[in-house]
């Protein structure tokens, strides 16, 4: 396959609005220990700022360090399983940085499918031990 990239749009990444929205989100973040630790609550970002095209920042805003830490801990715990599933999950995590796949039904279903395969493998592994 041959893909044609629009190098002008890649060069003007700063002008596409994502950096602006991310900076606006971080400025809007109230510096208070409780909000940093536990976030502002699920769904509060949509009413205040709209889509920021970065699910990690949205997770940090809504769930705080506890929510992001729990998500990253899950990534660490699945590392010992199937390497192919782990690689696909890491690809999904990278996609969360510049996109918003959890709000697109097809990508959200793919993420749920991959996580389901990872959990099925973990359950089967646990059942073999017992």
Image (cartoon, rainbow, N blue to C red):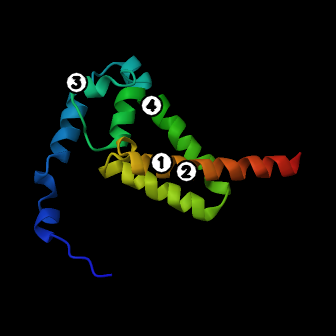
Rendered view: 4 above or below 48? below
Q: Where does label 3 land, which residue? A: 48
Which of disc 4 and disc 3 is earlier in sequence?
3
- Which numbered disc, 1 or 3, marks the residue closer to the eye? 1
Using a 10 Å C-alpha cutoff, classify the residue at mark 2 as few (fewer than 14 neighbours), some (14 to 19) or many (20 or more). Answer: few
Q: Nearer the viewer, residue 103 or 59?
A: 103
Q: CA distance from mark 1 to mark 3?
A: 27 Å
Q: Where does label 1 land, which residue? A: 109
Rendered view: 48 above or below 87? above
x and y, in percent, of residue 98 in the image: 30, 51
* Quadrant where the image shows the C terminus: top right
Q: CA distance from mark 3 to mark 4?
A: 20 Å
* Quadrant where the image shows the N terminus: bottom left
Side of 112 relative to 37 (left or right): right
Q: Residue at x 35, y 25 (%)?
A: 43
- The label number, if any, that marks residue 120 in the structure image: none
Q: CA distance from mark 2 to mark 1?
A: 6 Å
Using a 10 Å C-alpha cutoff, classify the residue at mark 4 as few (fewer than 14 neighbours), some (14 to 19) or many (20 or more). Answer: some
Side of 49 relative to 56 (left or right): left
Q: Where does label 2 land, which residue? A: 113
User: Please, what secondary structure does the residue beneath circle 4 have?
Assistant: helix
- Which numbered disc, 4 or 1, marks the residue closer to the eye? 1
Q: CA distance from mark 3 to mark 2?
A: 31 Å
């Amino acid at each position: 396959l041959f893909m044609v990239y629009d190098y002008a749009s890649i060069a003007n990444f700063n002008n596409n609005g994502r950096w602006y929205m991310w900076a606006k989100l971080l400025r809007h973040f109230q510096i208070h220990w409780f909000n940093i630790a536990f976030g502002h609550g699920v769904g509060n970002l949509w009413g205040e700022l709209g889509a920021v095209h970065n699910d990690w920042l949205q997770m940090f805003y809504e769930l705080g360090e506890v929510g992001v830490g729990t998500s990253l801990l899950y990534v660490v715990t699945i590392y010992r399983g199937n390497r192919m599933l782990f690689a696909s999950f890491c690809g999904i995590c990278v996609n969360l940085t510049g996109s918003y796949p959890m709000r697109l039904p097809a990508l959200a279903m793919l993420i749920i499918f991959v996580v389901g395969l990872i959990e099925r493998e973990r359950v089967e592994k646990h059942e073999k031990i017992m």
